Image (cartoon, rainbow, N blue to C red):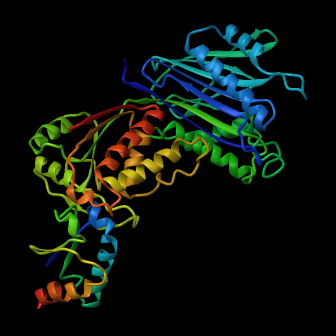
Amino acid sequence: MNNLWTDTGYVSINKNGEQLCGDKVEIIGTADDCLTLVLADGLGSGVKANILSTLTSKILCTMIDAGMSIEDCVDTIVKTLPVCQVRKVAYSTFTIIHIEHNDTARIIQFDNPNVIFLRDGKSVDYPIVSRMIGDKTVLESTVSLQLDDTFIAMSDGAIYAGVGKTLNFGWQRENIVDFSEAIFDWSMSAKTISTMIVDECNSLYEGEPGDDTTIACVKIKKRNPVNLMIGPPSDPKDVNMMMNLFFSKEGAKIVCGGTTSTLAAQFLGKPVNTSIDYCDPEIPPIAYVEGIDLVTEGVITISRVVEYAKAYLSSNDISAPWANRKDGAAQIAQMLFEKATDINFFVGKAINPAHQNPNLPINFGIKIRLIQELAECLEKMGKHIKVSYF
Amino acid sequence: MNIYICVGSSCHLKGSYNIINLMKEALEKNSLSDKVNVSAAFCLGRCTDGVTIKVDDEIITGVSPDNFNDIFDKYVLKGNL
């Protein structure tokens, strides 16, 4: 295992007036070894396109992940896709990005705009071999990977953005290349890059997309562990043990909860300086303790983080309200969603008697459930999660 | 004089945000802003009877917008005279 990590993220917006998206992104194996991402764009829009792209992406992703040849995959798709009654064809374009051991990428493309490849933030041409499979021309490439290498796959909705509205010929691939280079920043997540490009497409379409538009991004990042502690241990004798384990971990440290941060500060022999600034009246202010990267209140803050995480995971959300805010919940979201690859939760099971008041929405069960929900969301983002209870 | 206002979960839900604003206003009105330090505190350990504040070493619980003025007169103004 090397010190690299494959980060993925995608965003779709639907053609104006459609409830279903005709583009579909499927990802398998967000683990260490292999990762397969497929972006499929079904013929037409609405239900038909959605069925075509769902079948195509699911079949391709499963078969490629299982190591089967591209000939077999294409053959299966040709024989499986339902034929459109009106157009008498079964058709879906696709882009496959298959990453092995975080060091080699194989890209297979059929009729989607070509994948953009950024190295050190600049677009680079990569060798493309064209091959006929049946009557289809499939483009294949293999690239050795470096840190920060970024692949941007798109459906044709992206390059038609603005046609007949803000632009004569649409937002062509070279314009998207320029835009991607301009926004590129090493710390950005794949999801943020996708979101920014789709957001730009949406504004070129003046908020009324003429076609389903999808960006899927794969980015090679350095592993970045983050540790989050919430709640004192159920047995007060275990405080030192819990603190020892927590502070000996590699990576950034987040401590949530008033009592917990007081105990952590005592352990470190440092004072807790609580900020008085309510950046958001609903989220208690953060505090500062030397040696801890972020100190926040507990349950109220985390429940906001869970809300942010759920919105982040929906493929149609391009708002990311947490990205620019400074309250505790937004700062946790930035650290966990954007920067972290491996997250260790240290959850103390002590019960705060004051929180058992039925009038308060912050009882013990809620805390444990919130952490479980957050861990599930982060796993869906492709991160390694470990939860330890004390 | 140092005043701490608890912003732990319980006190937050019981209205720390309002108490902080009331405190800042009251200090300004009495021209005490530069003589009194107002800070937030994480959990003063009286979660059941919030909002809790601490004036120097004295802990006062159950502060609300209703009794704020009385508490301010009793602990802050008197303490300052």
Residue at left 56%, top 40%?
A193
Report the number of numbered marks.
0
The answer to whether residue A349 is above or below residue A359 is above
In the rendered image, which quarter is residue A65 located in? top right
| Residue at the extreme front | A358
Residue at left 60%, top 33%?
A216
Q: Position of residue A326 (x, y in %)?
A: 40, 58
Left or right: residue A259 versus residue A155 is left
Left or right: residue A210 versus residue A34 is right
Q: Position of residue A114 (x, y in %)?
A: 69, 27
Q: Position of residue A71 (x, y in %)?
A: 70, 8
**Foreground residue among A225 and A55:** A55
Left or right: residue B71 versus residue A81 is left
The quadrant in which the N terminus of chain A is found is top left
Residue at left 23%, top 56%?
A258
Q: Position of residue A185 (x, y in %)?
A: 49, 41
The answer to whether residue A86 is above or below residue A63 is below
Asked whether residue A358 is in view, the answer is yes
Asked whether residue B27 is in view, the answer is no
The answer to whether residue A107 is above or below residue A10 is above
The quadrant in which the C terminus of chain A is found is top left
**Foreground residue among A17 and A6:** A17
